[in-house]
Image (cartoon, rainbow, N blue to C red):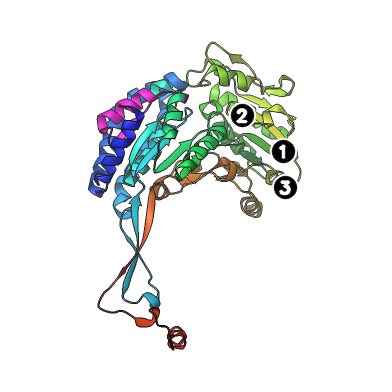
Amino acid sequence: MTIQEIVSKQRAYFFRGETLSVDGRIEALKRLKETICRYEEEIAEAISLDLGKSAFESYMCETGIVLSELSYMIKHVRSFAKEKNVWTPLAQFCSRSYKKPSPYGVVLIMSPWNYPFMLTMDPLVDAIAAGNTVVLKPSAYSPKTSAIIEKIIKECFSEEYVAVVTGGRAENQALLEEHFNYIFFTGSQAVGKEVMKKAAEHFTPVTLELGGKSPCIVMDDANIKLAAKRIVFGKFLNCGQTCVAPDYILCHSSVKDDFIKAVKKQLVKQFGKNPLFNPNYGKIINEKHFDRILALIDKEKVVMGGQSRKETLQICPTILDYVTYEDAVMQEEIFGPIMPILTFDFIEDVVEKLHSMQEPLALYLFTSDRSIADEVLSSVSFGGGCINDTIIHLATSEMGFGGVGASGMGSYHGKTGFDTFTHYKSIVDKKTFMDLPMRYQPYRNLYDKLIHFFLK
């Protein structure tokens, strides 16, 4: 089918009410869960071929998270989909007021290559739970994962319900020319702007999951050894190709040397003395990004790492010291295994500097001082984050995940994800056995009676 035919058939399928049954949604989610479990090994193999991830990392960061979201939705979607009664004002006496959760209709989900399975299937789970039909557009940069996604979807759903469109820019452009009822996009800020422009032509609401330079602040009272351990995990997971990875480190000057020593030890402990020959260390997605990341490394500021292998598209975990905000590595989101370290003396200077920069998707703060944590979390705008850890805030269905400002809009996961793909209709069900006369003309002598009615 062509893209136009897919969208047309999905719209007809939705208008027939095929997705409205909550029992039907639950069965669809269970079917998807069973199929993913059956293809778990193939999923891991596909992700390994695209990104070099180990089977353990694929499950921890992709398949396992999707299965967790599926379990959560299967358990809770019936209560999420119920009408919610609200208080009715006295002026609407003899009425029932309620909010009715209603699916938007035909949804487009466009996903990136860095977590190609999880960032495609997680929003799909939420969209199905909310009662929508879905067109999935996985990234052309991760073709093996796109292929297994297409195989799973075709086995689970008809194209009237859920369809996969593969391809590159031409297919992306063709999809954005269509009228969808909701668009969910994960990717770069540049493409996000184009998505928003196209969506505006049809007044289509959007969720944009973008990125940005997420800071990681290490205070002088932090547990340095533990901070280094957790920061190395978050920074170099998936070779730094994580939208919520700590992009750069803001380290208190008094503990910088100790922090660098601890990071060096953790790099050897977690990745070995020769990370490029570690079978569990992944690769950069393609040559274009490989060359871009290498260009950000100032060799004079490398204190560890810097090596690369073009034939395998691998770059060694790299630490840069004496970095300034003017350096090339600070001009764009790194999205690779480079850790620039900047220093500060006063947290007030950090907050002021962050105010002058675009809102990041995440912020991480390592400190033992609750007052400092409260000050930073209250003063700085960012999507989400952690105190004394990295990345783990997105791995739960109990909290929404999303950006703010330049890092995106809207969020998903769990109930928040259900709400994202749901329009809540506000309804007043007025009874007919009584009809107060006050609102009707003629208004002669009713003004004083109305005031008296509300003030008595």
Amino acid type assigned to the residue bearing label 3 in the image:
Glu
Question: Residue 294 occupies which quadrant of the picture?
Answer: top right
Residue labelled with disc 1: 255
Which one is earlier in the sequence, the residue at label 2 or at label 1? 1
Question: Do residues under tags 3 and 1 come within 8 Å of each other at their CB atoms?
Answer: no
From this view, report whether residue 341 is shown above or below residue 50: below
Element carrying mark 2: loop
Viewer-side residue, 4 vs 420: 4
Rendering coords of residue 213 (x, y %): 62, 36
Q: Residue 352 has which mark?
A: 3
Select label 3 or label 1 by which is in front.
3
Viewer-side residue, 234 vs 22: 22
Q: Which residues are magenta?
A: 146-169
Viewer-side residue, 169 vs 414: 169
Rendering coords of residue 317 (x, y %): 60, 23
> Which quarter of the rendering shows the N terminus?
top left
- Horizontally, residue 104 falls left or right of residue 313, namely left
